Image (spheres, rainbow, N blue to C red):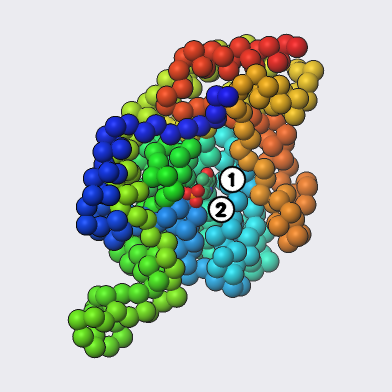
């Protein structure tokens, strides 16, 4: 089975990890700060706070921005559940904004409408989590302008989008948001096995997130309520967690970062090839906004169901039978049973639901060969003309 995504591990990656195993520090050593500086430096952010997952990075990001009970967090329904769950972890309530039918990202027009209604009802969100779906940056200028008008904070869930650019600049530089989060899960652009990072230009937010990542404990006298009792002393000033990344993971991350731009370029080469090979099939290929240079984490096609005899499910199953490990990103979060219990229902976000009924993620990863890609295209052709 050709998977929809997979990591590449080189000898240099292996050597980097072995080097850490043979060193003094398996955790809390020099590799994590080195990885943080590497990623922050690459994307142009002041600070990087590495965590053991993007999910935990999203959690500390929400807490650092002061999210709590009585607050609202808004996000898109077409995302992984973690983009919404971070609000629930903080005791806040979650709501959604429908997607743009061309980019599949959170729609700024729908956002403007919903904000106007929420202002009238006195229920404005404290945080908006935008998701750069498939690696394509959202319309950040429009969303940022709305945040200025309505006073909400922005977290970019850039789990798909390290290496992407918006208006020529790397996602993560914080020009249009407070915090950006990357994921380093093996299917993402670069990997640390499990891992994530929160990027920010704010010294205060970086300090808070670093504190929350490690039990809310400080060893810095400047941040204590009174002078240390002695050289052993540490002080817990917040209720934090153990969300730390290990040194092994960070060393793998530094090694993988050397290939980030090459990976994104290879993904673009594959996407151009898919675009051409699929041009005459009854499918809609991904549309790229002129402001966006996607990281192309995913290559999602939509079936033009009115031109196809089979159902979405039949096409999906037939591709899997032909060894093509297609997937579906994502089941609209509001339709998950856990969220439906909060009162969300089918029909609430029609663009997202229509997308879900038509979308299929084709294999897309830097080591996908042209022969494998030809197999995918041929299988799709056979299935669609059956
Ligand atoms: C993968 C992913 C996450 C979670 O990342 P982890 O590192 O696995 O916690 C969050 N949001 C989106 C959009 C993702 O794709």
Dot in front, 1 or 2: 2
Look at 34% across and 55% down and name the residue there: 246
Judged left or right of residue 265, residue 381 is: right
| Residue 304 in view | no
Picture mark count: 2
Looking at the picture, does residue 345 appear above or below residue 281? below
Nearer to us in this view, 64 or 188? 188
Residue 93 location, quadrant: bottom right
Can you say which quadrant of the picture contains the N terminus?
top right
Judged left or right of residue 205, residue 308 is: right
Nearer to us in this view, 67 or 270? 270
- Residue 181 is situated, as x and y percent measured from the top left of the image, at 43, 51
Q: Is mark 2 within 8 Å of ligand 1?
A: yes
- Residue 257 is situated, as x and y percent measured from the top left of the image, at 31, 39
- Residue 150 is situated, as x and y percent measured from the top left of the image, at 53, 61
Look at 42% across and 44% down and name the residue there: 193
> To which residue does mark 1 refer?
79
| Dot 1: element | loop
Residue 82's disc number: 2
């Amino acid at each position: 089975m050709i998977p929809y995504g997979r990591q590449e591990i080189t000898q240099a990656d292996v050597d980097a990890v072995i080097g850490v195993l043979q060193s003094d520090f398996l955790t809390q050593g020099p590799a994590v700060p080195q990885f943080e500086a590497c990623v922050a430096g690459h994307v142009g952010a002041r600070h990087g706070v590495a965590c053991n997952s993007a999910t935990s990075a999203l959690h500390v990001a929400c807490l650092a921005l002061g999210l709590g009970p009585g607050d609202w967090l808004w996000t898109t329904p077409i995302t992984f559940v973690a983009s919404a769950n971070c609000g629930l972890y903080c005791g806040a309530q979650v709501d959604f904004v429908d997607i743009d039918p061309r980019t599949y990202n959170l729609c700024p027009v729908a956002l403007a409408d919903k904000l106007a209604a929420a202002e009238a009802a006195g229920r404005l969100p404290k945080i908006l989590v935008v998701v750069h779906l498939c690696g394509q940056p959202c319309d950040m200028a429009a969303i940022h302008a709305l945040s200025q008008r309505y006073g909400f904070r922005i977290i970019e869930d850039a789990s798909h989008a390290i290496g992407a650019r918006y208006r020529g600049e790397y996602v993560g530089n914080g020009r249009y948001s407070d915090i950006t989060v990357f994921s380093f899960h093996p299917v993402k652009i670069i990997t640390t096995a499990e891992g994530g990072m929160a990027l920010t230009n704010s010294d205060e937010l970086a300090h808070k997130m670093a504190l929350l990542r490690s039990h809310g404990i400080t060893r810095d006298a400047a941040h204590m309520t009174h002078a240390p009792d002695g050289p052993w002393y540490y002080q817990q000033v917040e209720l934090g967690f153990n969300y730390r990344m290990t040194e092994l993971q960070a060393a793998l991350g530094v090694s993988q970062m050397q290939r980030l731009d090459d990976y994104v370029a290879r993904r673009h080469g594959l996407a151009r090839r898919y675009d051409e090979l699929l041009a005459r099939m009854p499918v809609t290929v991904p549309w790229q906004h002129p402001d966006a240079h996607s990281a192309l984490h995913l290559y999602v096609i939509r079936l033009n169901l009115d031109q196809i005899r089979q159902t979405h499910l039949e096409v999906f199953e037939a591709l899997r039978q032909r060894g093509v490990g297609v997937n579906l990103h994502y089941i609209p979060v509001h339709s998950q049973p856990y969220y439906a219990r909060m009162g969300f229902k089918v029909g609430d976000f029609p663009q997202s639901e229509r997308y879900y009924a038509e979308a299929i993620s084709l294999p897309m990863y830097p080591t996908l060969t042209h022969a494998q890609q030809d197999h995918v295209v041929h299988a799709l052709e056979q299935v669609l003309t059956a």
